[in-house]
Image (cartoon, helix red, strand yellow):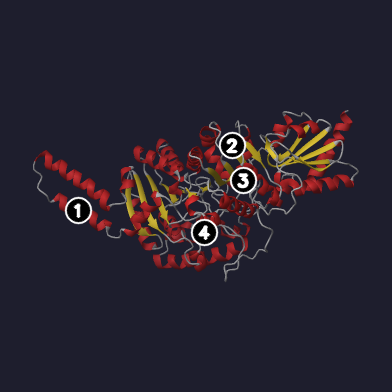
Amino acid sequence: MILEELKQLNPKALDKLAERIRKFLIRSISDTGGHLASNLGVVELTLALHAVLNSPEDKIVWDVGHQSYVHKILTDRKDRFHELRKLDGLSGFPKPHESEHDAFGTGHSSTAISAALGLATARDLRGENHKVVAVVGDGSMTGGLAYEGLNNAGRAGTDILVILNDNEMSISQNVGAISRHLNEIRTASSYLGAKNSVRNALSNLPVVGGTLSKGIESVKDFVRYAVLPSVLFEELGFKYFGLIDGHDIASLISTLKKIKKIKGPVLLHVHTTKGKGYIQAEHSPSSFHGVGKFNVETGKPTTSIKLPSYTDIFSRAICQKATADKSIVAITAAMADGTGLEHFKHLFPDRFFDVGIAESHAVTFAAGLAMGGMRPVVAIYSSFMQRAYDQVVHDVAIQKLPIVFMLDRAGAVPEDGETHQGLYDFAYFSHIPGIMILAPSSATELEAMFTFALQQNSPVVIRYPKDTAPDIPLLTPIVLGKSETVVKGENIAIVFVGAMRGISLEIVEKLRGKGYNPSLYNARFVKPISPDLSTQLTKYKYVFTIEDATKIGGYGSMLKAINSNVYTLGFPDSFIEAGTRAELFNRHGLDSTSLAEKIEQIYKESLTHD
């Protein structure tokens, strides 16, 4: 739909359009997978925004971005939804290179207010006059960066509109004081009336002398804090409007038209229902936050049952260990289900801590728990762990605290694209002194590595992909700094890291079929590098490392510093797009056929140079 046509529709016609969009989203995402519940919740809000604003002149910044599907539909991308989150397809997040209507690229939480303030400040410096809006979910308000942005915007006094989309959810149920504060606003249905009544009463009092005047101001402050939960935002320098029904298009449009004329920072608080219009998503919004293909009638996944995932194996392992060891505590950042901690949460509620979308706080909180005698296990996605780098260095590693970091979604991450790839953890952890890094290649290896990590008196990182975990017997135990010899050969050595085991075995078979006899080693430890392995590798003229990570800063680059005859085979120095793991491996030459050919090519070229 052309946006100018949208502006001509009356509220009744917009309601009908909202219904059509919901049906399209449900049908389309059931075929492709994607973020469903969050987008169903913002249909009316998105329609109202585009009915009032003039995109792309006016800028809309979508926090996280997984609620931007309706925005994409309205900005001429509806016909591309069959390729949503596919290789070279439509991104699941806002991408400025994809459309001029995407004002800022987002994928991680709590960034929109800071980005919008930057856009608004640039507008003012350039003498322009368009509107800048940040749409922020209440889940994102559990992240500290959101408050840094609010504080700066309120102090600067810049014209900016923040829309707080309050659906009482992030990915998991919201937690913490901010969630309680927003709940007070939702439930205080009479607070606006109380505010006006108090204001009228105070204004009618006779003011005699400075003492009474000061007393009235104290009374006003008391009443504000007693009956106005919105005071948090007002004290930060924002004019607060709300709470309004985020599914009432007429009210949304009327309110937006009025407040867009107001100067300075404004916050509009709307209440929406995550999963609105699809009963299964309304009843289980967490399950329908990010979904694979599903049956529309039942809401059940249509994909076949696979082997347990690495996440499933970790979930089982931590519950078993915590049953015997009451010092084990689990911490996550708004992803209890995604990291496999949901079962732990139910079994050990007093030892489970969901800190909200606050990865930095999660790490330092864990450091305090460790200093207090507990054994913290921090489960966070690899790409989100990037947000807590300083805390790992300053609060954990320097103090040599025994914290186990379980990095889910490491390596190539399917469908979500550049902002969610877990390819950089080797690079940002490996140079931190005193940290061990392990990568399991099977279910049994993950369990054994987790047991090993809990026995250490220093920080340990275990990273694993969003993938099934092969059921392979553990032939040798996990010993500090020891690798595993998988296949013994000569002249050529291949060292794989973690989940690259299956591909590496295929490479060995392909090379054997061409007359080569390569050895194959399982690194197990990315750091420290096995001294025995390093010694063994000096006997080979050609050593190839294969890893589900970036070549720069990866395991191969560390091994090459010790053994100069190492060739690193991993992901290139570029941001990796959306696609299945198999598609991404194929595109970047990390499938078994391409790797076998690359190894043979290097081998032959070296012979000609000798």
Q: Amino acid at mark 4?
A: Ser
Instruction: State the CA–CA distance, disc 1 to disc 2.
Output: 59 Å
The reply to whether the C-beta atoms of the residues labelled 4 and 2 are less than 8 Å apart is: no
Going by the numbered disc 2, the residue's amino acid type is Asn
Q: Is the residue marked by circle 1 packed among few (<14), some (14-19), or many (20+) residues within 10 Å?
A: some
User: Hey, which residue is sitting farthest right in the picture?
Assistant: 515
Residue 58 visible at all: no
Q: Amino acid at mark 1?
A: Val
Front label number (1 vs 4): 4
Which structural element holds mark 3?
loop
How far from the left and from the top, in percent, is residue 600? 84, 40
Cα–Cα span, label 1 and label 4? 41 Å
The answer to whether residue 429 is visible is yes
Amino acid identity at mark 3: Gln
Vertical side of 473 occupied by 543: above or below? above
Q: Is residue 605 left or right of residue 226?
A: right
- Residue at the spot of label 3: 421
Label annotation for residue 198: 1
Give the crowd class for mark 4: few <14, some 14-19, many >=20 residues within 10 Å.
many
The residue pinned by badge 4 equals 286
Where residue 150 sits, quadrant-wise, is top left
Q: Position of residue 189 (x, y in %)?
A: 30, 60
Disc 2/disc 3 C-alpha distance (Å): 30 Å
